[in-house]
Image (tube, rainbow, N blue to C red):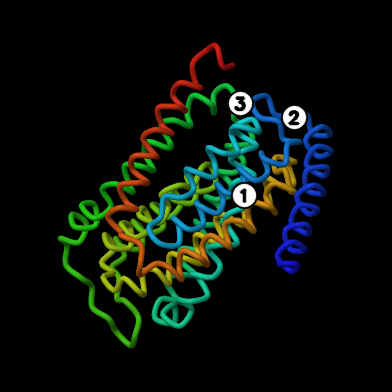
Amino acid sequence: MGKRFCCAKILLNVCIELRDVAMFAAAKSGMMPKHMDISSFFSYLFLFGAAFIAGGVNAVAGGGTIFSFSALSLSLPMVNANATNAAALWPGSLSSAYAYRKELSGNKKLFFILFVPTVIGALSGAVLLVNTSESLFRRIVPFLVLFALFLFAFKDQIMKVVRQGKPIPIVNGEPKLSPLAYVWGVCFQFFIALYGGYFGAGMGILSLSSYTLMGLRDIHKMNALKNPLVVFINLLATFYFLADGKVVISLAILMGIGALVGGYVAARLSKRISQNALRMFVIVMGLAVTVWLFYRSLPFWQ
């Protein structure tokens, strides 16, 4: 009992310190929240909980980014919320990239080919976001969330359609892609990275669909290719957002910890979690968030 009390006291002190840092950072950068009191301990607890849910949902089913972004948008302007969310959640994808490192050996050539448009696209998307006005981004966000929710809800049907083409042969452990497949892969990877640097939710299904259209079929090798590229997209965007002062670092750290803990807990409990129930939860909550974001885009919220 004494140990639990000490741990709770330490957590409380950490949150109070993070609160003070966040208040200073937000005041200095002119990002003091308009809709939620960031100085409240319970607002920190709420953001930590939202990141915990996002990390858990991402680890098991995907689609969790919507929850953490929506929670942050209560406290920050939407552009800053998006940038802080990107900074908070990218470390959680490192574990997936590391887990698939051995499967990447058969796709190293393709990885390095796709790496170039990944870098250019991610930085372009980040620059585009930073130069998007708050009022315009507020009107765009509901459509981005709806697009991500569509990808999540119909990902099985999308993958079924794109798998109808012929798989490509494997020569010496490497996929033998046609020149047209390489052109498609490079062009669409740039689009994915551009979208990822700008907003990001739904990058996974877009990447897998692109690789499938190129002719790849091994889901493990496709995940091994996708995960590090997604990490680089988020990492490059995060660095640019940090350099431009769009990230509230204390909130990113707090929510990053929440997402990591949530992902770990969900992974441990994944066999007990109903995939269909979780899928429906994400879809229903995502629709509710979309309606709320459309409502917030109305003129009287400006």
Q: Amino acid at mark 1?
A: Phe
Picture coordinates of residue 9 (x, y %)? 78, 57
Q: Amino acid at mark 3?
A: Glu
- Residue pictured at 62% horizontal, 49% vertical: 48
Secondary structure of the residue carrying tag 2 is loop
Which quadrant of the structure image shows residue 173?
A: bottom left
- Residue pictured at 23% horizontal, 73% vertical: 168
* 91 lies above or below 38: below
Q: Residues within 10 Å of mark 1 (few under 14, many from 20)?
A: many
3 and 2 marks in contact (CB < 8 Å): no
2 and 1 marks in contact (CB < 8 Å): no
* 242 lies above or below 37: below
Q: Amino acid at mark 2?
A: Met
Left or right relative to 188: residue 33: right
Quadrant the N terminus occupies: bottom right
Q: Who comes first in sequence, dot 2 or dot 1? A: 2
- For this orientation, the residue located farthest to the top is 300
Closer mark to the observer between disc 3 and disc 1: 1
- For this orientation, the residue located farthest to the bottom is 172
Picture coordinates of residue 70 (x, y %)? 53, 37
Secondary structure of the residue carrying tag 3 is helix
* 302 lies above or below 201: above
- Residue pictured at 33% horizontal, 49% vertical: 152
Q: Residues within 10 Å of mark 3 (few under 14, many from 20)?
A: some
Q: Who comes first in sequence, dot 3 or dot 2? A: 2
**Marker disc for residue 32:** 2
Which quadrant of the structure image shows residue 245?
A: top right
Dot 1 corresponds to which residue?
Answer: 48
Q: Considering depth in this image, is 204 or 26 the residue closer to the camera?
A: 26
In whole angstroms, how far apart are the C-alphas of marks 3 and 1? 25 Å
Dot 3 corresponds to which residue?
Answer: 134
